[in-house]
Each structure stands twice: as structure tokens, then as C-alpha cells.
Amino acid sequence: RPAADLGIVVADVQRAVAEKPRTMSKMRQVIAQRLTQSFTSTPHIFVTVSVDMTDLLDFRNALKKNGAPYTVTDFILHATAQTLTEMPEVNSTTDGKQVWWHSRVHLGLAVALEKGLVVPVIWNADELSLMELHDRNAELSRKARDGKLLPDEMTGSTFTISNMGMLGVEQFTAIINPGEAAILAVSSTMPQPVVKDHRIAIRQMMKITVSADHRLIDGAMAAKFVNAIKAKLEDVERWKRMV
């Protein structure tokens, strides 16, 4: 019978060809499996704060003029690592019955590639200076883009940061990596009107959101965690003493 009699038109054939299934890459399959496992087995709680980055950005720009290579990510890494040492409950692992607090902070930093997402790990981040964090992060990011990360450079993280600051994102939440208690989502820094000293001013604001395992971390602790990071990032005098 003619195709038209069966209700089939050329557009149907074209659509069927266009919608031919494609096999997911091995990397994407692993990502899908791990994130599905985490999101379906871990009760997530999300807490967001807005960080005033104006003074820190001015300080960073001044450093840059003098040849210092620091990025915003470097400051976030340092502030997060130090906060995790202050709050070991967030730097932990659970099997649902027992909890292990990690003695060291091994920070994973998600890096987006064409084939998927990789998470290089900065081991002992809590022991590194701001410059050491910068150097290690730059090295791992370069190796990730070149596909040259070693196995032990992609495993062992105790906490992960997902930074989409360069993508024009106002706010987002991230899924906790299996085996960790929380993950920090860092959004873009954008000019926003805020009330400062009883006046409206345009400030460079950045939202950070912690996704936490609610079995281990309640709302108050999650709020304390992100506010501690916020306080460090906004304390420019602290950074001046450091560099």
C-alpha cells in the first residue's frame, strides 16, 4: 500500500532517521550511573548565600597588575579548604550507619570537557598556600583538558566544588558525588543592586550553594558552612595578610 494510505509522510521518515539512538560515551555512562546512584540514595538539602565579591575582585585586579596570577577559583578553593578543617562534619563519608570524618581535605574541582565531566583532585588542599593551590589547580586543569590526568589525580576527593562562574549562571545546584557529604556550587559574579550602609549600591555578587547529605548535615550546619566561606571571601584584609 502507498505510504500515504498508512498515514506516513516524508516528514515521519526524516524524523525517524534524525531520532536514531546514539550510544552514550563510556565517560557519560559512568557519570550517569554515579549521579543517579547519589541522587536516588542520598537525601539532598540545598542552602544558598550571596557573596559580595566587589572588594576581593578589586584586590585581585591590583595583584594582577603586579603580575600575580591568582584566579577567583583560587580564593574559593582556599576558603573552602579552610572551612572544611573548621567543620569536619562536612568533610565526611557515611555508609548509612557509620560516619567517618576525614583528617585531610582532598578537594575535587569539576572540569567540563567535550566528552563529559572529570573531577581532578587536589590532595591535602588544607595544607596548601594560596599560591600552591593556584599552581596545583592550574596544573590539574591543564592535564584534564589534555586528557593526561593520572588515575590517582581523579580519585580520593573528600569534597567537590562545581564552578560555573565563567558560564553566566545566576544560580544552580549540584548533585553530591558518591562517598562525599556535600558539594559546593559556585555561580557567576554579576553586578547587582544591594543595600549597603543604608544605601543602594551596585556590587559584584556571587551566589554559592551547598548541596548536603541531610542524613549528616542539617539546615543550620549547611547555613553555617556557606556563611563561613562567604565571610572568608569577603574579608579582604585576610587575603592581604596571606599574599
Image: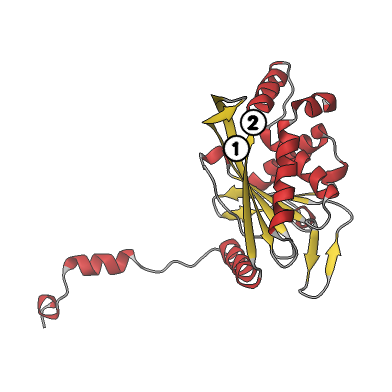
Rendered position, 148 above or below 175: above
Q: Tell me the element at label 2.
A: loop
Rendered position, 26 above or below 76: below
Looking at this view, is 183 or 110 the one in front? 183
Task: Using the numbered discs, state the Cα–Cα distance from disc 1 to disc 2 in whole angstroms.
Answer: 7 Å
Q: Residue 53, labelled with which disc?
A: 2
Find residue 201 and report its image quarter. top right
Residue 120 at least partly seen:
no
| Residue 9: % across, % down | 16, 70
Q: Amino acid at mark 2?
A: Met
Provide the residue designation for mark 1: 206
Q: Residue at x 74, y 49 (%)?
A: 225
Q: Residue 144, labelled with which disc?
A: none
**Residue 18 appears left or right of 114:** left
| Residue 142: % across, % down | 68, 41
- In what quadrant of the picture does the C terminus appear? top right
